[in-house]
Image (tube, rainbow, N blue to C red):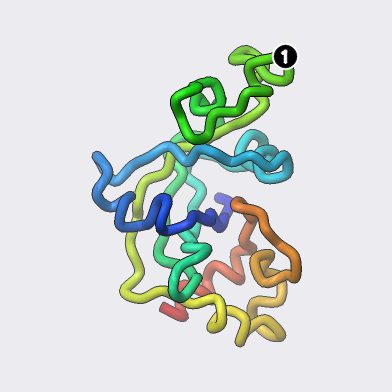
Amino acid sequence: MNYWLLKSEPSTFSIDDLAKAARKTTMWDGVRNFKARNMLRDTMKKGDQAFFYHSSGEPPGIAGIVSIIRAGYPDPTAFDPAHPHYDPPSNNGKGTREDPQWYAVDVRLVRKFKRIIALDELRAHQSTALSGLTILRRGNRLSVTPVEKKDWVFIEKLE
């Protein structure tokens, strides 16, 4: 099993929105960064676990845990002109449904944390326990990042 951190703007889609979704399940779509796309497409597998991170919340931080219930597949929103994640280049030769440019996964809520584990709290452990946590690296903007098992276990204990 692999561990991940998935970032979302809570004003766009929050952990509470996921909790209200049918079967507490949704497609994790709209990723438009090639490095993050490669993780969705090539590395993320059914059964993996991910922290659900509110990126611009007050405070920004980890809100809960989701499970990957469907591995990477072509992101249908890239081909839908009516969808906010529509990507015109996906429709003019840079990506096709047979050879897609963008991928999505399906996630299901495992549990919402009793409290947000704030970014500042995570940073307080950066020089010791969480030295490898990608989200704490300067300049990291990826919406999908791997999490080492030791970091996963430590963060769960913070809750």
Q: What is the crowding at mark 1: few (fewer than 14 residues within 10 Å), some, or many (at least 20)?
A: few
Count of marks placed on residues: 1
In the rendered structure, which amino acid carries the disc numbered 1? Gly
Q: Residue at x 42, y 58 (%)?
A: 10
Q: Quadrant of residue 154?
A: bottom right
Residue 12 to residue 127: above or below: above
Residue named by callout 1 = 93
Q: Residue 53's x, y, as percent?
A: 49, 62
Residue 157 to residue 32: above or below: below
Q: Quadrant of residue 41?
A: top right
Q: Residue at x 28, y 52 (%)?
A: 19
Q: Residue 147's x, y, as percent?
A: 62, 61
Q: Residue at x 30, y 57 (%)?
A: 16
Q: Of 133 and 12, which appears nearest the observer?
A: 12
Q: Residue 3's x, y, as percent?
A: 56, 56
Q: Residue 98's x, y, as percent?
A: 62, 12
Q: Residue at x 62, y 30 (%)?
A: 102
